[in-house]
Image (tube, grey):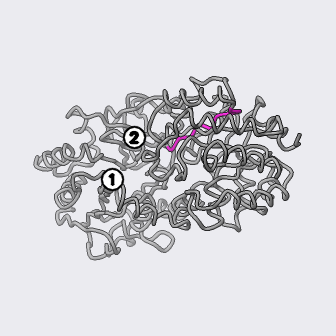
Amino acid sequence: MSEKTRQFRRLLDGDDLEFLIDAHNGISAKVGEEAGFKGLWAGGLCMSAQYGVRDSNEASWTQVLEMLEFMADATSIPILLDGDTGYGNFNNVRRLVRKLEQRDIAAVCIEDKLYPKTNSFIDGNKQQLADIDEFCSRIKAGKDAQSDDDFAIITRVEAFIAGWGLSEALRRAEAYREAGSDGILIHSALTTPSEILAFKKEWSDRSPVLIVPTKYYATPTEVFREAGFSIVIWANHLLRAAVTRMQDCASALARDQHLMSIEDNIAPVREIFRLQEASELQDAEERYLPHNNHEAQAIILAASRGAALGDLTANRPKTMVEVRGRPLLAHIVDAYNNAGIRNITVVRGYSPDAVNLPALNYVDNADYASTGELLSLARAMEASAADGDDLYVSFGDVIFKRYILDIIAEPDDDFVIVVDTNWQDSVNVGRAADYVHCTESHTRHDFYREVYLEEAGEQLPEEQRHGEWTGLLKVSANGLPAFRELVADLAADPENRHAKLYSMLNAVIRRQHRLRVVYTTGHWLDVDSLSDILVASDFT
């Protein structure tokens, strides 16, 4: 019997929520242990990345074993290996288990996909799941092969990733439990924990459940604890952090037990994919696999001067005022680019020649001084926003974190807006704001409920305010034709010449379209004043 397997069993079967940190070599394993973590996750993404190859079984299982041996020798805490699909059929799995036990690895997680696997966050819904009976044969063979009774085989259910839903996830998990699985890792690529919480509610306590909240990192850890999960895996954050910040990152996670304090300051997963040349594989998929040629587009309304900024906007519009040496518009474009949105149209008005960032499309509203936001949007819609593409609309003086685009992209609704629950914050006092009244106010139960807009406006009574609209709107490709017609109709009415954009939201509702609301608390900033410029310097 191994002491490390006993340690892992205590983590897996204990009553308290436990945490594992990612490690991919001896030094990162030591950093994780010294930070106070009780166990390590040797993730497929991280293990392959440190060899400079893609997370598609391009690193052999013997190369993984070699690095695991260094990690195990460097630490005294248990390691859970992300064993991908088991590197083959039942025979490969039983040989893998024997080799892991020889190297004092405490547990292995295998996922129910086909070999070679692809990272779950790259076109997950195109990936095929393994046949249930065949996958169960891998589990049974692995259990029969182990000599240490405490060695654990965790089975990772990919039904949500592949788009099969809750029933299939439960059906597979039960089959794997009966085949001998010691725990279920339920995986989701959503930015909210709705799928994994629904699974845990139905699954109850039939066996321990592990989760990897890489995508839904904004969820408070207390939600996981109350739901009764066994282990939370911070799956790739030491790798994504700069080498010089590894110790700080591990200490922060061990101290805070949530990702919010570090997520916006580390490299996104897409940067790791870039270093692995995952883009080449995606290019090949574009050549050989059926695909959708459309990509998202954005419109940024930046026609106004921003007179409240005084001399700062004497010869340039507010969107070109610099924060940390770069225009506001550049920060907004960066946020879109980081979300993969590069087709961006900017509506100019005041001092248009000053708005001259490269690689952008420009539309001018010559009547900006005598028209409102709605007319600027209409000008852009006339010149861009091709049907077949999702459309994002935002303002040229509103900066936001990547998280905002993550949460607005998730819902399938035709119309989606982001609403800030922190509308009573002192920074809002004394300025106009687009308040909203919704079907429900923000609660921690929003993970289960869909919230929709009922009314928007600057003059909403305080008791009806559920939040402030951030100015960010997403229109799906399916909803774009109706949206185009609505904006054209509104713009043609002389009474709307000075209309602000929130009036368009109310018009969407009047035409019997549902307008989905996703809540946030912070992560954006409306730059209206000199004091806002100072705040923006810390925000970006």
Q: Is residue 224 left or right of residue 501?
A: right
Numbered disc in front, either 2 or 1: 1
Identify which amino acid the numbered label 1 is placed on. Answer: Pro
Disc 2/disc 1 C-alpha distance (Å): 23 Å
Q: Which stretch did the figure color magenta?
A: 181-189
What residue appears at the point 58 percent right and 65 percent down from the top-left corner?
A: 53
Q: Which mark is residue 411?
A: 2
**Does residue 477 appear in the picture of this structure?**
yes
Q: Residue 514: x percent and y percent?
A: 29, 34
Q: Is residue 229 left or right of residue 10?
A: left
What residue appears at the point 36 percent right and 49 percent down from the top-left corner?
A: 471
Q: Closest to the observer: 76 or 484? A: 76
The residue indicated by pointer 1 is 290
Q: Secondary structure at mark 2?
A: loop
The correct choice, above or below, for 150 with respect to 55 in the image is above
What residue appears at the point 64 percent right and 58 percent down from the top-left corner?
A: 46
The correct choice, above or below, for 441 with respect to 282 in the image is above
Q: Closest to the observer: 229 or 431? A: 229
**Quarter containing the N terminus:** top right
